[in-house]
């Protein structure tokens, strides 16, 4: 039997090519697979040298497939979809009843884990496998349920809107007692501020949300403020706030447990609601009617309502 293995291109380069072709962008492909844009360009060059023909037409803000590129993309896309479906099936067979839930490390750490015992108390028969990642889970990841920021309608997945993002200042009760000037937005300019730095947003598609952007959204003119300490992971921001180091720019869904426990408080009521940034519950179509998925979905929505972020 004839084998096509001898004509297979470098498979890592093929994966990069598929992402670049799907997005029509080397930059977005780099963000998806967590490499630099130059690394994407090198992998595409490897493929073009392998075939001896251009696969993309490079333009100023995007790239377009050549006729040869379209042929390769159609086959590659179908092949990766098949591999992804087969991979998921293997995981399902090996899970033995486990429900795989995918979310960001931050959401899992600050929202899901504090409520995990409640889930176990409500539904002790659900066996969970928690899968975390730096950015929102991708649809080709091997999950049953995912909590994502943003969603593009895709066949085979059921999406339920959960909540919009909202940001507001938080600090400890002790910090507020030491800084009575924190009775209005103006008081924020007199105390240390804590935020995510730009490295956190480097490979994300969303506009960075920092204190400067928050002040602008609340109609405050750009002016000098006190020391700003920045971190590349949100749990570090929260840890610094809990240690009375300053006022943090907090996301409502990520600080809700700290607010419930009175570890953190809102020194002022002003906030910034980002209506274009909605979180979704993503479920594989073939699993949406299973008892485990229905139970988890019901529990998740009820907890979101209880935390006041819906």
Image: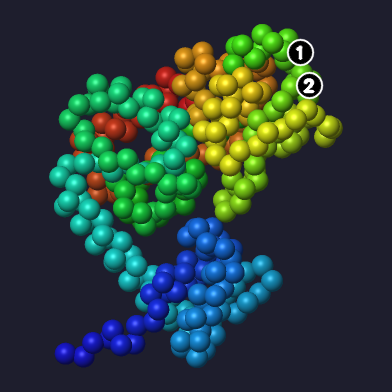
- Report which quarter residue 140 is drawn in: bottom left
Distance between the alpha carbons at the discs numbered 1 and 2: 8 Å
Crowding at dot 2, Cα within 10 Å, few <14 / some 14-19 / many 20+, comes out as: some
Give above or below for 194 relative to 18. above
Label 1 element class: loop
Q: What percent of the width, then of the height, locates residue 250?
A: 59, 28
Q: Quadrant of the N terminus?
A: bottom left
- Residue 288 can be seen in this image: no
Can you identify the residue that label 2 sits on? 190
Q: What percent of the width, then of the height, locates residue 178?
A: 69, 10
- Report which quarter residue 300 is drawn in: top left
Query: Residue shown at 41%/72% (left/top)?
Result: 12
Q: Are marks 1 and 2 in contact (CB under 8 Å)?
A: yes
Whether residue 296 sits left or right of residue 54 in the image: it is: left
Give above or below for 294 relative to 31. above
Give above or below for 39 relative to 85. below
* Sequence-earlier tag: 1 or 2: 1
Query: Residue shown at 31%/61% (left/top)?
Result: 84
Whether residue 290 sits left or right of residue 234 in the image: it is: left
Can you identify the residue that label 1 sits on? 181
Give above or below for 296 relative to 96. above
Whether residue 187 sits left or right of residue 243 in the image: it is: right
Whether residue 264 sits left or right of residue 209 in the image: it is: left
Query: Residue shown at 50%/71% (left/top)?
Result: 21
- Report which quarter residue 38 is drawn in: bottom right
* Viewer-side residue, 107 vs 161: 107
Label 2 element class: loop
């Amino acid at each position: 039997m004839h084998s096509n293995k001898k004509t297979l291109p470098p498979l890592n380069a093929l994966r990069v090519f598929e992402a670049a072709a799907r997005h029509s962008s080397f930059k977005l492909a780099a963000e998806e697979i967590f490499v630099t844009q130059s690394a994407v360009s090198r992998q595409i060059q490897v493929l073009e040298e392998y075939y001896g023909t251009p696969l993309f037409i490079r333009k100023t803000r995007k790239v377009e497939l050549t006729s040869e590129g379209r042929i390769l993309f159609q086959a590659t896309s179908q092949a990766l979809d098949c591999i992804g479906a087969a991979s998921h099936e293997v995981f399902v067979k090996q899970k033995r009843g486990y429900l795989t839930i995918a979310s960001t490390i931050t959401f899992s750490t600050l929202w899901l884990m504090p409520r995990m015992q409640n889930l176990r108390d409500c539904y002790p028969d659900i066996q969970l496998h928690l899968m975390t990642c730096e950015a929102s889970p991708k649809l080709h990841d091997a999950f049953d349920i995912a909590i994502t920021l943003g969603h593009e309608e895709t066949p085979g997945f059921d999406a339920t809107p959960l909540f919009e993002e909202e940001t507001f200042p938080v600090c400890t009760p002790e910090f507020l007692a030491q800084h009575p000037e924190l009775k209005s937005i103006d008081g924020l300019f007199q105390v240390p501020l804590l935020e995510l730095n730009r490295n956190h947003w480097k490979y994300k598609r969303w506009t960075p949300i920092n204190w400067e952007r928050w002040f602008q959204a609340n109609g405050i003119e750009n002016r000098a403020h006190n020391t700003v300490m920045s971190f590349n992971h949100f749990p570090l921001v929260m840890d610094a706030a809990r240690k009375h180091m300053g006022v943090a720019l907090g996301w409502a869904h990520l600080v809700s447990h700290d607010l419930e426990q009175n570890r953190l408080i809102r020194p002022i009521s002003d906030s910034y609601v980002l209506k274009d940034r909605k979180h979704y519950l993503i479920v594989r179509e073939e699993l949406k009617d299973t008892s485990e998925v229905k139970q988890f979905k019901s529990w998740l929505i009820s907890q979101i309502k209880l935390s006041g972020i819906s």
